[in-house]
Image (spheres, rainbow, N blue to C red):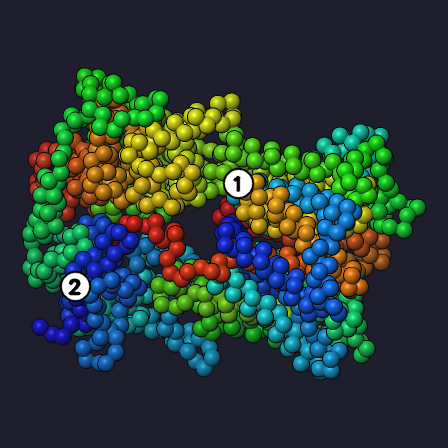
């Protein structure tokens, strides 16, 4: 079952972003009692105070990490759809390690991100060893591990003194410093910036990044030039898992200070949307993450103001996914690959 | 003459700036087998697509109205290498498109019987009930022919239907076509094999660089056709200012980089001449076999010395494509050996390992396998020098720029380093790939279809570059389906025909090359490895 | 336990046959999960709004068929990546159902039918009818033949003058109809629409397609296997005390095992 790698085109990206905005507007107009007021809340809610702004930036920092994770896999021509599970796994590992064992925050970070990297790398290895599409296995592994993690949080790891289905809180010493109290913005945001800069350097400035790009462009060319295609299948998937794992770690050590059932929901999917909107370019990840964090925060504010309980998140994601690889505006007939075939026979 | 089934009238067809057809004329009358002959790239496939209505002509007309009935003539094309749905029985593959129905259902038995009847009528022996995946290479061809006949066409178009088949199977197919013609239908028969075309066709139309010549009625002598087709080529070659073996290299292309490929030692034929004595690349009774297409080439006896430029020419289907498939690991050496500097190559090779033996190979499908179209010019340019560009793993901008500029300068390409490759013209991309692969002074340097997509100016630059390489001691091998390109570039020319090596010539032997190329049997002076032994 | 097995079998089979029809046409329908949700929600909503049960099944099928149409529009016409489009449909259904539920019934939680669930027998009968029809369509009709060739060797079909995308469109639409029917039957049998009612059935259906060697008869056997697992799982929860949340992982684990083995075998072949 051949699954082509999705390649977002610039115009499709803009269209997808636009479609996402229009969808938000339409849903609000159709459902809100006072659409005008709700739209206003949607537009300015996230910027209205320090708390809201900080929370939006905090969300954007985690989306930057997951978006970067998707990008590095993408650039190697592989696709990590298991972000949801990888974020969740790292979060649960980080919180349980910090709660159960007398270890430092650094050790927890290594273990958490490492476990997510292993999960991502496993899909890459399966692709390399058996040819099973990493797109599908990464999704399925993530979907398989999620109920297990849920179980751990509702039973063995649960904090018996809390009403929440959550672990106990991690020690103060292991928490990341707040940057804009009382919001959840924390030093994890610096990790995210650092990650994006590192990603840019690795991709643009190193031999590893060069070969990774070539493998991503054309695996036949990579083989022709004698590159190890297998390495560039497994390692980028593992690095992708690693970055998702960092997002999960920040979620625990910087934001919630504990793991709560299903609390990482959306970071993985939205990371893909961020990467697609950023057209896999590291320098566009941060703006794309801000855009998405704004969409999320605005919708949430609008919903709260409207006392409604529906959420826009998955609809907006769906719209982005539908449009972002589609060529709605394609001119019929000639395409660039056809133009290249000059051999007149 | 009877009213024709099909008339092609002053048809021209352009692909961007490239003219594939100009003033093409052709008529197909009932009850004839009409041969269409021409080099690879002469425009035969384009003409077929225009005739079939797959593409519209840019100028001129194609009339396809049946002369007796007021409807379009029924036309079927037999593809050269068809792939059938392998899990389905053969007959189900063959009825699709005009399946008999029984109410809402497929009338399977009737469909099978219908195909069987056609097979019988045209004397095609084929097990229709086994899965298509179990068919051999010959049977697949027969199945494709049968599928075309199942559409009950009045006009049948075949493109090289007998390439790689045994004599028995060839004559089976030709007999089928004669039967078809005798039903007052007509056949357009495309082939490179002039002898075969002359033996079966009632009329033959030569196609030369997009232009047709008036159809010749049977009997046509293969020699006559060869003169028409390749006489032109020979004269065109003499127009080109061909410098003798590495002579005119006084650096018309100043190498801008800091590391020019041997500017000083270019016009030094001394070491080159000394190197000639040892064959750097040697095929010894080598037989190349592709198990998927069940085709063979050989035995080949080819010696290429350092400092020489050698062409291996023939139509692609003569086995030229098999050499390329061997070099990209798709076909294997089944008997005999191929050696580089005396060391034997594996029976199956891969391009990366070849490169480590310092053999450069530029495949003819270089857009697909030797370029990253979504990558930038620079990303493509530094491919083979990536270790140099990234000392200790980190990129050095100046080196990346230097190498890119140097490669672009070889053919005088003026593009930005950061442009995506797909934004360049096909010819420019070709030049960049050639420059990249030839830049490393390989011991052996093999280029498939070197002139494809290059204009005359660039062809001459390429010639100069190859001469320079040879003068530096490389053994240069050109695999080309164009006689003209072979004569332009090489000082020794091996000619393949129908899966065998049929002669070795100097570039001046126009007539002999053309005859060998066209498969006209004649005792050829020079050398002529025997074609017996049934290695096809 | 037998009725429990047969009823799980029937619903999985109908959805899997839907997956089969688009897969045989060459497009893996990742959106089955969303189509089940759409079918389930539309059917329950229809009954709540006064439609009779047979009509509700049709409405469920129609709702999922719309998703199939969306799939075709984006992947066939606009050249979008089929996998991403499939995921989009899953997300779309998961997001739209609660939104509509909120608008129609004022809740985003479960919607319970007062009359309760329908009987198991018609569900099983429908599955049998769909099984026979799918077999006949695939192997004994012209569109079925063309669909199979479109999936296996599209170039050959095109060379015979038959449009490939047309049959892939038919495959996707039928896929939607069947997955929607499966979802409708699931919800109507339970007598309730629940959030996440599909619970991985769309993915299991894809496994069934491969385990069943891509033939309707094979699917019927493979679906039985999962029907038994389903029923046993319910027992395991109550008798063995295995936590139910962990069992939710089972379909995905099985899917990944089946998928990887299939890929490994294919590579060997």
Q: Secondary structure at mark 1?
A: loop
Whether residue B182 is visible: no
- Mark 1 belongs to chain: A
Whether residue C19 is visible: yes
Q: Marks 2/1: CA distance?
A: 50 Å
* Quarter of the picture holding the N terminus of chain B: bottom left
- Residue A77 lies left or right of residue C11; in this view the side is left
Q: Nearer the viewer, residue B484 or A40?
A: A40
Q: Is residue B220 above or below residue B416?
A: below
**Label 2 belongs to which residue?**
B10
- Residue C111 lies left or right of residue B461; in this view the side is right
Cβ atoms at labels 2 and 1 below 8 Å apart: no
Q: Secondary structure at mark 2?
A: strand
**Label 1 belongs to which residue?**
A76
Q: Is residue B414 above or below residue A31?
A: above
Q: Is residue C35 above or below residue C264?
A: below
Front tag of 2 and 1:
2
Please give the name of the residue rendered at 56% of the width and 66% of the height, measured from the top-left corner.
Answer: C70
Q: Are marks 2 and 1 on the same chain?
A: no
**In x, y percent, where is residue B447?**
28, 36
**In x, y percent, where is residue A233?**
55, 39
- Mark 2 belongs to chain: B
* Quarter of the picture holding the C terminus of chain B: top left
Please give the name of the residue rendered at 66% of the width and 61% of the height, measured from the top-left corner.
Answer: A24
């Amino acid at each position: 079952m051949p699954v082509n790698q999705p390649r977002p085109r610039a115009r499709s990206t803009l269209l997808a972003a636009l479609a996402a905005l229009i969808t938000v507007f339409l849903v609000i107009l159709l459902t809100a009692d006072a659409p005008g007021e709700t739209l206003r809340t949607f537009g300015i809610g996230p910027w209205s105070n320090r708390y809201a702004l900080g929370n939006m930036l905090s969300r954007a920092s985690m989306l930057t990490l997951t978006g970067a994770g998707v990008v590095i896999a993408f650039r190697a021509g592989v696709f990590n759809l298991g972000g949801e599970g990888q974020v969740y796994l790292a979060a649960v590992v980080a919180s349980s390690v910090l709660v159960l064992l007398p270890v430092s925050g650094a050790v927890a970070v290594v273990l958490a991100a490492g476990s997510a990297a292993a999960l991502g790398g496993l899909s890459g290895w399966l692709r390399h060893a058996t040819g099973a599409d990493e797109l599908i296995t990464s999704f399925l592994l993530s979907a398989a591990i999620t109920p297990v993690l849920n179980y751990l949080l509702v039973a063995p790891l649960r904090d018996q003194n809390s009403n929440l289905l959550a672990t106990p809180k991690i020690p103060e010493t292991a928490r990341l410093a707040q940057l804009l109290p009382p919001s959840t913005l924390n030093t994890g945001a610096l990790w995210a910036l650092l990650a994006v800069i590192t990603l840019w350097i690795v991709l643009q400035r190193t031999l590893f990044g060069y070969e990774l790009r070539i493998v991503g462009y054309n695996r036949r060319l990579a083989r022709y030039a004698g590159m190890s295609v297998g390495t560039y299948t497994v390692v980028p998937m593992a690095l992708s898992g690693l970055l998702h794992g960092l997002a999960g770690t920040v979620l625990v050590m910087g934001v919630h200070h504990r793991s709560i059932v299903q609390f990482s929901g959306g970071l993985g999917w939205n990371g893909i949307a961020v990467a697609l909107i950023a057209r896999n370019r590291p320098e566009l990840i941060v703006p794309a993450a801000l855009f998405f964090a704004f969409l999320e925060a605005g919708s949430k504010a609008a919903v709260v103001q409207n006392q409604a309980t529906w959420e826009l998140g998955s609809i907006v994601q769906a719209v982005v996914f539908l449009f972002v690889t589609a060529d709605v505006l394609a001119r019929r007939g000639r395409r660039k690959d056809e133009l290249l075939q000059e051999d007149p026979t | 003459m009877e009213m024709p089934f099909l008339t092609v009238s002053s048809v021209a067809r352009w692909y961007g700036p490239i003219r594939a057809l100009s003033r093409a004329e052709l008529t197909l009358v009932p009850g004839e087998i009409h041969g269409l002959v021409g080099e690879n790239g002469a425009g035969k496939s384009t003409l077929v697509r225009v005739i079939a209505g797959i593409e519209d002509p840019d100028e001129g007309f194609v009339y396809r109205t049946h002369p007796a009935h007021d409807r379009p003539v029924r036309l079927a094309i037999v593809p050269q290498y068809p792939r059938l749905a392998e899990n389905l029985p053969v007959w189900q593959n063959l009825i699709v498109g005009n399946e008999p129905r029984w109410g809402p259902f497929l009338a399977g038995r009737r469909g099978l019987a219908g195909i069987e009847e056609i097979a019988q009528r045209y004397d095609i022996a084929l097990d229709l009930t086994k899965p298509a995946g179990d068919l051999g290479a010959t049977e697949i061809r027969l199945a494709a022919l049968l599928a075309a006949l199942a559409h009950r066409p009045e006009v049948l178009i075949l493109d090289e239907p007998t390439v790689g088949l045994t004599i028995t199977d060839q004559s089976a197919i030709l007999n089928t076509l004669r039967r078809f013609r005798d039903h007052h239908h007509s056949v357009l028969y495309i082939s490179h094999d002039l002898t075969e075309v002359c033996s079966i066709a009632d009329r033959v139309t030569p196609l030369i660089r997009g232009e047709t010549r008036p159809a010749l009625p049977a009997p046509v002598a293969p020699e006559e056709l060869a003169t028409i087709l390749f006489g032109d080529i020979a004269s065109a070659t003499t127009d080109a200012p061909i410098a003798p073996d590495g002579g005119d290299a006084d650096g018309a292309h100043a190498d801008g980089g800091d590391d020019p490929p041997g500017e000083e030692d270019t016009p030094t034929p001394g070491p080159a001449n000394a190197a000639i004595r040892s064959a750097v690349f040697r095929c010894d009774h080598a037989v190349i076999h592709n198990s998927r297409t069940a085709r063979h080439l050989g035995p080949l006896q080819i010696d290429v010395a350092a400092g020489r430029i050698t062409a291996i020419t023939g139509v692609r289907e003569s086995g030229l494509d098999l050499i390329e498939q061997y070099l990209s690991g798709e076909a294997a050496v089944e008997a005999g050996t191929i050696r580089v500097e005396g060391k034997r190559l594996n029976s199956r090779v891969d391009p990366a390992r070849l490169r480590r033996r310092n053999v450069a190979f530029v495949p003819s499908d270089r857009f697909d396998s030797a370029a990253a179209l979504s990558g930038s010019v620079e990303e493509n340019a530094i491919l083979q020098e990536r270790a140099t560009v990234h000392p200790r793993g980190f990129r050095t901008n100046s080196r990346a720029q230097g190498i890119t500029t140097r490669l672009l300068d070889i053919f005088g390409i003026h593009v930005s380093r950061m442009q995506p490759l797909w934004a360049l013209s096909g010819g420019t991309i070709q030049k960049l790939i050639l420059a990249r692969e030839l830049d490393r002074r390989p011991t052996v340097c093999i280029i498939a279809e070197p002139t494809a997509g290059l204009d005359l100016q660039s062809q001459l630059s390429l010639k100069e570059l190859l001469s320079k390489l040879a003068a530096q001691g490389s053994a240069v091998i050109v695999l080309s389906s164009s006689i003209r390109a072979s004569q332009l570039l090489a000082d020794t020319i091996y000619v393949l025909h129908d899966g065998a090596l049929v002669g070795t010539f100097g570039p001046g032997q126009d007539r002999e090359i053309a005859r060998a190329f066209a498969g006209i049997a004649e005792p050829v002076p020079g050398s002529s490895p025997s074609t017996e032994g049934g290695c096809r | 336990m037998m009725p429990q097995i047969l009823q799980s079998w029937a619903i999985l089979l109908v959805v899997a046959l839907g997956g089969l029809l688009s897969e045989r046409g060459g497009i893996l329908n990742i959106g089955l999960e969303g189509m089940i949700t759409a079918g389930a929600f539309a059917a329950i909503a229809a009954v709540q709004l006064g439609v009779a049960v047979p009509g509700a099944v049709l409405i469920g099928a129609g709702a999922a068929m719309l998703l199939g149409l969306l799939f075709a529009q984006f992947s066939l016409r606009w050249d979008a990546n089929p996998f991403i489009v499939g995921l989009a449909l899953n997300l779309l259904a998961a997001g739209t159902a609660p939104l509509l539920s909120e608008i129609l019934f004022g809740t985003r939680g479960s919607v319970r039918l007062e009359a309760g669930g329908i009987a198991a027998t018609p569900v099983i009968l429908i599955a049998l009818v769909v099984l026979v029809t799918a077999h006949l369509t695939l192997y004994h009709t012209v569109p079925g033949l063309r669909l199979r060739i479109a999936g296996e060797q599209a170039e050959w079909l095109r060379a015979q003058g038959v449009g490939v995308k047309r049959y892939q469109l038919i495959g996707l639409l039928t896929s939607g109809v069947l997955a929607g029917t499966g979802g409708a039957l699931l919800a109507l049998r339970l007598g309730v629409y629940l959030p996440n009612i599909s619970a991985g059935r769309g993915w299991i259906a894809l496994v069934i397609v491969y385990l069943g060697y891509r033939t309707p008869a094979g699917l019927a056997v493979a679906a039985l296997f999962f029907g038994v697992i389903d029923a046993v799982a319910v027992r395991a929860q109550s008798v063995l005390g295995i936590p139910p949340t962990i069992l939710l992982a089972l379909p995905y684990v099985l899917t990944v095992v089946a998928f990887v083995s299939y890929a490994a075998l294919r590579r060997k072949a």
